[in-house]
Amino acid sequence: MKSHLGYFIFLLSLLFLPQIVDGQNIFSEKNFDHSKSFLPYDISYTFPLEDKEFVMLSEVKRSTMKFGRYDQYFFEKWEKEIEFGKDESVPQMFIKGDSVVTFCVTTNKDKNELRLSFRYFNLQDGTEYSPTNYAINVIVKDELIPQISFCENRSKFVVYNYLVNQDNTEKYEFSIFEMGNEKPEHQNYLSSESIISSKSRTVHLSDNGDLFLVLVEPGDFHTETYFWGIKSSQPASVDNNFFFERPVQNIGETIIVRQSPSSYMIAFSGLIEDELIGFNITGINVVLKTVMFSYNQNFRKEEIDEIYGNYYYTSQNQKKKRLETPEILVNYRLIDSYTNSAHDIILAFEELEIPVQYHETAVSENMPWKYKSNEDKFYFAGDLLLYSFTESGELKWRKSIQKTQFSQANALGLSYIPKMSGDTLRMLMYESSRDGNFYILDINTVDGILRKTINLLPDEKFEFAKRYSCWLDDHAVILCGIAPANINKRTLMLVEF
């Protein structure tokens, strides 16, 4: 009787193991008709629509792009070539309602000018509407680069991180624009003494126009937050101190999540050169002007051992050295966050030799059409670390995902393409290890359990370009595969699984 009971428990346990599935159905494919080197900028040019259709902005030649809407067989619903100014930065794009929007962000330091140009296209037939252009006078000093950030529904954006002269005094200006209007809807100011050059600066703009600013000073472990409500003339401010066990040289990436109309969560990483030594997550109530919680995580060796003891992996064929637990976290970066139905916040850290811009809502640095090629250079990306916190700031679970990625000339093959499907975080990524290819990992964000691993196209061998890849729905993706022996030979594939 005991042996039968043990066998039953064994069979029951198999039901809760992650399911490994091979998916090989290439529904349709076509050659990518651009044989020159891809632009090196890690931004997305492929966006899903209903019924497995998608829009894509693709490269033709310098300052010329091809723009189109395509069905699941890669037949165009409409397609056109569009020209951009040679002195403009390379365009970015997003979908807003029934329109596709391209925009260029160009800073001219010699003229102390930031230029923004937006172009709007009808999603149904590609008809172009009247553009909006902005020329904002800025004072560029102390290596300041003006930044742009959008609200979630893309109806507004804020331009910040620059100085202006106001009443013979230099101040930081935060200009909020309604999309399509060339005059700012609101302008907020902060004295230049409040923002010294060593402080990192990050903003969050809400759909209704509320603005939240986070300043982090690494030297004295101090944060300052400022909140301008839509009708506020002066900001509400909250200060907080955090603690890392080792002195911090720089603050890495900062992420802001709006938890409610009155509360925000901020997370940021602390660095010594390229080593991630810790991170902080803090909750702020801007109405009560209080700190709701503050959690400091230091990456001691025992913490690294702990999270690497709770690991998943893409391919079983990782080199043994890649499966070893690191002594310290070199080149690990805070890259993204996700929220589930329980209002948990999941932070994603990734080992990246070079930064990826794919997870950013907008890239503010100039991206020139003419660039220096690095085709002889291979860049590396490694493991992911996931930390989940409740909305009250309690650590809920932590996991590591071990992977190996190499990308030639740029970061287009590194990192992953995320999709939140209910409470499941779905991660589409490329794996460079032996017999690796494309993988999808499904992680339940409520408990951190890996529910499913899908090995896409296990009998094929491609490298990856995220820019021309995307999720179409829960069971289909667009992949841009690159032939390993010829990086100028690319294939677009619609893969179902």
Image (spheres, rainbow, N blue to C red):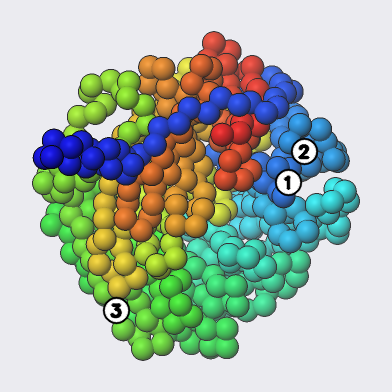
In the image, farthest residue toward the top:
485
Tag 2 residue: 71
In the rendered image, the quadrant that contains the N terminus is top left
Which residue is tagged 1?
Answer: 51
Residue 443: which numbered mark, if any?
none
- Is 256 on the left-hand or right-hand side of 95? left
Q: In this view, does 413 lie to the left or right of 304?
A: right
- At x 51%, y 53%, the residue is 421
Q: Which amino acid does label 1 sit on?
A: Asp
Q: Between residue 151 and residue 140, name the one nearer to us.
A: 151
The structure residue drawn at horizontal position 35% and vertical position 86%, both measured from the top left corner, is 289
Q: Is residue 393 above or below residue 104?
A: below
Circle 2 crowding by C-alpha within 10 Å: few under 14, some 14–19, many from 20: some
In primary-sequence order, the first of circles 3 and 2 is: 2
Q: Reply above or below: 154 against 65.
A: below
Q: What residue type is labelled 2?
A: Asp
Pick the residue in front: 459 or 84.
459
Where residue 281 appears, x then y in whole percent? 30, 64
Element type at mark 2? loop
Percent x, y of residue 100? 75, 52
Crowdedness of circle 3 by 10 Å Cα count: few (<14), some, many (20+)?
Answer: some
Q: Name the residue under label 3.
A: 292
Residue visible at 24% across and 28% down? Answer: 323
Nearest to N terminus: mark 2 or mark 1: 1
Residue 337 visible, this orientation: yes
Indicate whether 329 appears above or below 206.
above
| CB contact under 8 Å: marks 2 and 1 | yes
Can I make out residue 91 in this image? Answer: no
Q: In the structure shown, which secondary structural element does the residue marked by tag 3 occupy?
A: strand
* Foreground of the two, 356 or 305: 305
